[in-house]
Image (cartoon, rainbow, N blue to C red):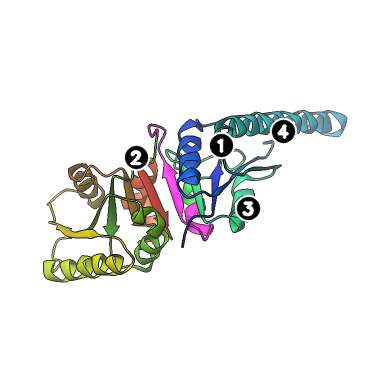
């Protein structure tokens, strides 16, 4: 398995520099084609009008969206000009989530920005929270602070769920290029540590059979400290440049309201995160 096609989702109202840099670098590492995608929909005003005035307003709004999409295409092509691989652009006046999800069929991995608000503008932004749930592809979330994809140390956040198993398999191409890989389970109060260690040991052994040398680790439960905080602490200890994790092992609504590891990784982590659902 490799990443033969990298897709990068651009946003109208967010910085795209970091995700373009990381997506371009990822495509170079794997000698992959890269596809830039963006979409936006004109958001009509809340006040009511009709007739020619209404149509004029709609025409003007859609023309503005097209100009902004053209600007994004220019930014994408400029960022990929010296990458050497095949670059393709796709855009539409459409709802971003719907358009990007449809285009994801041609990609092996989708690159997106992080830091999306809890309730994002569906007319202008394909939220990573929606993409990871529905794309059927791994999602690489790139924070605005990132300047490169640091694979010197990769942290696999392990929990024995289908999402985590899928994430590790989806991350194999990146893990094979990593210098150090750590598989960690975050113990919860009352967990049997020996069971948790057996789990991460199995994952490390599975990775070894796929050409990846990994160490196994269980982080002890700490009273009054969230799993996300413990994971961030371990990531700091191993100087991880990338975290691999399953997305929304709990219900998405529960994480949105109460918080959780996925919510933290998408919105607050300063590291690149590869997520699968």
Is residue 145 visible in the rendered structure shown here?
yes
Q: Label 4: which residue? A: 66
The magenta-colored residue range is 131-147
Q: Mark 3 packing: few (<14 Cα in 10 Å), some, or many (20+)?
A: some
- SS type, badge 2: loop
Cα separation between marks 3 and 1: 15 Å
Q: Quadrant of residue 269?
A: top left
Cα separation between marks 2 and 4: 31 Å
Q: Which residue is at a point 52% across and 61% down the rendered structure image?
A: 136
Q: Is residue 170 above or below residue 234?
A: below
Name the N-terminal-most of marks 1 and 2.
1
Name the N-terminal-most of marks 4 and 3.
4
Cα separation between marks 2 and 3: 27 Å
- SS type, badge 3: helix
Q: Is residue 243 magenta?
A: no
- SS type, badge 1: loop
Name the N-terminal-most of marks 4 and 1.
1
Is residue 259 visible in the rendered structure shown here?
no
Q: Label 3: which residue? A: 103
Residue 29 is situated, as x and y percent measured from the top left of the image, at 45, 46
Cα separation between marks 4 and 1: 13 Å
- SS type, badge 4: helix
Tell me if label 2 and label 3 are in contact, CB under 8 Å: no
Q: Label 1: which residue? A: 11
Closer to the camera, 93 or 86?
Answer: 86
Q: Label 2: which residue? A: 268
Q: Nearer the viewer, mark 3 or mark 1?
A: 3
Name the N-terminal-most of marks 3 and 1.
1
Residue 90 is situated, as x and y percent measured from the top left of the image, at 67, 44
Horizontally, is 192 left or right of 184 in the view? Answer: left
Q: Which residue is at a point 59% across and 48% down the rendered structure image?
A: 97
């Amino acid at each position: 398995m490799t990443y033969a096609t990298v897709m990068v989702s651009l946003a109208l109202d967010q910085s795209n520099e970091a995700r373009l840099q990381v997506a371009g670098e990822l495509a170079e590492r794997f000698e992959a084609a890269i596809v830039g995608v963006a979409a936006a929909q004109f958001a009509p005003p809340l006040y009511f009008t009709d007739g020619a005035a209404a149509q004029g307003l709609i025409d003007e709004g859609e023309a503005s969206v097209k100009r902004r999409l053209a600007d994004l295409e220019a930014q994408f092509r400029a960022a990929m000009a010296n990458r050497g691989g095949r670059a393709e652009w796709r855009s539409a006046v459409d709802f971003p989530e719907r358009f990007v999800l449809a285009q994801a069929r041609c990609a092996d991995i989708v690159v997106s920005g992080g830091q999306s608000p809890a309730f994002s503008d569906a007319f202008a932004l394909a939220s990573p929270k929606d993409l990871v749930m529905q794309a059927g592809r791994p999602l690489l979330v790139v924070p605005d602070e990132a300047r490169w994809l640091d694979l010197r140390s990769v942290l696999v956040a392990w929990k024995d769920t289908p999402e985590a198993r899928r994430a590790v398999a989806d991350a194999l191409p990146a893990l094979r290029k990593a210098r150090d890989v750590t598989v960690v389970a975050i113990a919860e109060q009352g967990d049997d540590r020996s069971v948790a260690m057996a789990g991460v040991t199995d994952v490390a052994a599975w990775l070894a059979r796929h050409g990846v040398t990994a160490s196994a680790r269980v982080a002890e439960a700490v009273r009054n400290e969230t799993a996300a905080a413990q994971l961030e602490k371990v990531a700091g200890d191993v100087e991880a440049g990338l975290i691999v994790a399953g997305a929304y092992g709990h219900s998405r609504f529960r994480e949105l309201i109460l918080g959780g590891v996925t919510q933290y990784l998408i919105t607050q982590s300063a590291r690149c995160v590869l997520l699968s659902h």
